[in-house]
Image (cartoon, rainbow, N blue to C red):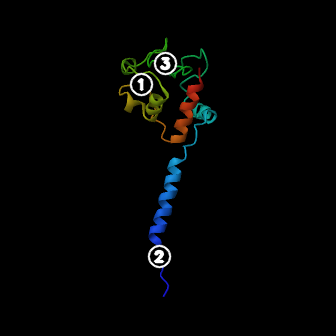
């Protein structure tokens, strides 16, 4: 009489191996070119992105990475933003852009946030190129 092995442990092992392979695969790199498109669709109505760009509804974002929050001359920041103590790193921008008022309660930015992780990654990568 032939003996058959239980297929469940083998299927489980295959699933675990596939999961480990996926976990070891680095996430797709952010795409600053796509981030520029995201900027034009979601940010450019309120923010300029050029060196010496004007203050619009919001402050210019050229050079935002590495800049202290609430520090662009000529823009009237909320007290919450001025006193936040934040310096804009890619990680801080990533958190802020998911929900500005969640990170800094009392900010004036009327934006619900970006909830698509790839759009968010791409936008932050684009903002980092503005220097």
Instruction: In the rendered structure, find residue 86 and report the number of the disc placed on it.
Output: none
Q: Nearer the viewer, mark 2 or mark 1?
A: 2
Please state the horizontal and vertical placement of residue 114, each as a whole percent of the image: 49, 37
As drawn, the residue found furthest toward the right would be 33
Mark 3 surroundings within 10 Å by alpha-carbon count, few (fewer than 14), some (14 through 19), many (20 or more)? some
Mark 1 surroundings within 10 Å by alpha-carbon count, few (fewer than 14), some (14 through 19), many (20 or more)? some
Instruction: In the rendered structure, find residue 108 and report the number of the disc placed on it.
Output: 1
Q: Which residue is mark 2?
A: 5
As drawn, the residue found furthest toward the top would be 73
Asked whether the beta carbons under mark 3 and mark 2 sit within 8 Å of each other, the answer is no
Residues 109 and 25: in front is 25
Residue at 47% across / 76% down in the picture? Answer: 5
Quarter holding the C terminus is top right
Q: Which residue is mark 3?
A: 67
Q: Earlier in the sequence, mark 3 or mark 1?
A: 3
Mark 2 surroundings within 10 Å by alpha-carbon count, few (fewer than 14), some (14 through 19), many (20 or more)? few
In this view, 93 is above or below 56: below
Q: Secondary structure at mark 3?
A: loop
Q: Nearer the viewer, mark 3 or mark 1?
A: 3
Q: Earlier in the sequence, mark 2 or mark 1?
A: 2
Asked whether the beta carbons under mark 3 and mark 1 sit within 8 Å of each other, the answer is no
> Do we see residue 97 in this rendering?
yes
Q: Nearer the viewer, mark 3 or mark 2?
A: 2
Q: Earlier in the sequence, mark 3 or mark 2?
A: 2
The number of numbered badges drawn on the structure is 3
Q: Is residue 15 left or right of residue 106?
A: right
Residue at 61% across / 36% down in the picture? Answer: 31
Q: Is residue 98 left or right of residue 29?
A: left
Please state the horizontal and vertical placement of residue 43, each as a whole percent of the image: 55, 29
């Amino acid at each position: 009489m032939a003996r058959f092995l239980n297929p469940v442990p083998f299927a489980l092992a295959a699933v675990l191996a596939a999961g480990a392979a996926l976990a070891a695969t680095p996430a797709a790199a952010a795409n600053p070119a796509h981030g520029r498109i995201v900027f034009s669709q979601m940010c450019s109505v309120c923010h300029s992105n050029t060196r010496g760009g004007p203050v619009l509804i919001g402050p210019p974002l050229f050079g935002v990475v590495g800049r202290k929050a609430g520090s662009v001359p000529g823009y009237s920041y909320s007290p919450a933003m001025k006193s936040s103590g934040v310096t804009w790193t890619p990680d801080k921008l990533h958190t802020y852009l998911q929900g500005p008022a969640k990170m800094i309660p009392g900010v004036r930015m009327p934006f619900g946030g970006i909830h698509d992780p790839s759009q968010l990654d791409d936008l932050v990568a684009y903002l980092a190129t503005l220097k």
